[in-house]
Amino acid sequence: MKIWRILLAVVGIGIGTYGISQLLTQVPRQTLVLVALWLIGALIIHDGLLSPAVVGVGAALRRYVPDRGRRYLQFGLIMAAMVTVIAVPMIYRARTQPPAKALLLQDFGINFTVLLAAIGGGTLIAYAIRVARDRSVPGRPPPNQAHE
Amino acid sequence: MGQTLTPLEPIGLLAVREPSKGPQGVPVNRTAEEANVIAAASAPDWTLTIMGPKPYALSLAEIEEMAVHGARFPISCVEGWSANADWRGLRLLEIVERAGGTAGSQIRVRSLEPAGFFNKSVIFGPQLSQALLATHLNGERLSVDHGYPLRLIAPNRAGAFNTKWLATIEFIS
């Protein structure tokens, strides 16, 4: 096993070194500065904003949302966040291209709202089914009545 | 979604491109304005020059008269979309043969576009045998964004090599 690890490390470091050397020799200085800015920006947004927000929301859910509903809410929030990341640049860039290209012609604001509504509705329906099932299974009372 | 698997287009709520919304039902990647060809392409005295062993030229009126061959070819763009369309025009091979070429010739077509990587392309072999010099797209005269007065269209070829706004046809061999 150890020999494989060493082999993988050597190959990985080799490919990485090749990539960096290509970057330094093939890309103009000005572009490299932009690449560096982009990487630093990505780091700040990811570690400074996104990660704390996700951890914070996760902690809040654990604290304030009952067990049974939490996973449905988590699912809905994750889906909504992914759709948001895709939709926001589209909303921002809509109708900026020559019409002949058939590019960015949709009303992305409305479509984004429709998708969020579908995610919200789907999550609610899934949760309602879960609640109904819990009620109909004999000997398994719903959690909110179990401790009465 | 819907850019390559076109039946899915109506549900692509966040799709960047909607192929059916392009002019004449086909999107355009490079507009006539971007290519800087609007004046040259709309000139009534435009001619197609064929520079072969027996060179000749065709006027706009002659081209229109000869445009009787139809074919259904897709445009498959490397930018991630494709669209099928009905094309009508002249058979490139007939034009080449009249200039002294054969199905084995290697042909370069040049655009009116003054600069850029895609203002020319090379065609030979089975593509040459099937290629049209198109005047019509989906039953209508080509719009200037689609290559008016004349464009190349052939199957199994990257979209960008279906050269638009043709000006000359040359023999490489």
Image (cartoon, rainbow, N blue to C red):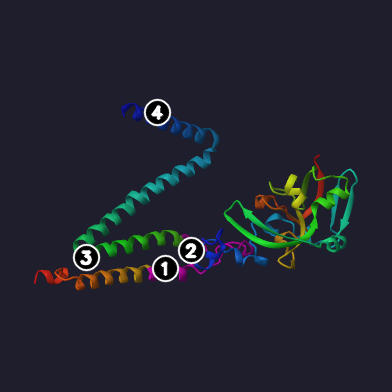
Asked which secondary structure carries label 1, the reply is helix
| Residue farthest front in this picture | A138
**Between disc 4 and disc 1, whose residue precedes?**
4
Residue that mark 1 sits on: A115
Q: Is residue A112 left or right of residue B86?
A: left
Amino acid type at image mark 2: Leu
Q: Residue at x 31, y 61 (%)?
A: A75
Q: Quadrant of residue B25?
A: bottom right
Amino acid type at image mark 3: Arg
Residue that mark 2 sits on: B14
Residue that mark 4 sits on: A10
Asked which secondary structure carries label 3, the reply is helix
Q: What residue range appears in magenta?
A: A89-118
How far apart are the two marked residues, 4 and 3, measured between alpha carbons? 48 Å
Disc number lying in front (4 or 3):
3
Q: Is residue A100 above or below residue B116?
A: below
Q: Is residue B19 above or below residue A33?
A: below
**Between disc 3 and disc 1, whose residue precedes?**
3
How far apart are the two marked residues, 4 and 1, measured between alpha carbons? 46 Å
* Residue under disc 4 on the same chain as residue under disc 1: yes
Report if the CB atoms under discs 2 and 1 are less than 8 Å apart: yes
Residue that mark 3 sits on: A68
* Callout 2 crowding tier (Cα within 10 Å): few <14, some 14–19, many ≥20: many
Query: Which of the chains bears the disc numbered 3?
Result: A
Q: Is residue A39 left or right of residue A104?
A: left
Disc number lying in front (2 or 3):
3
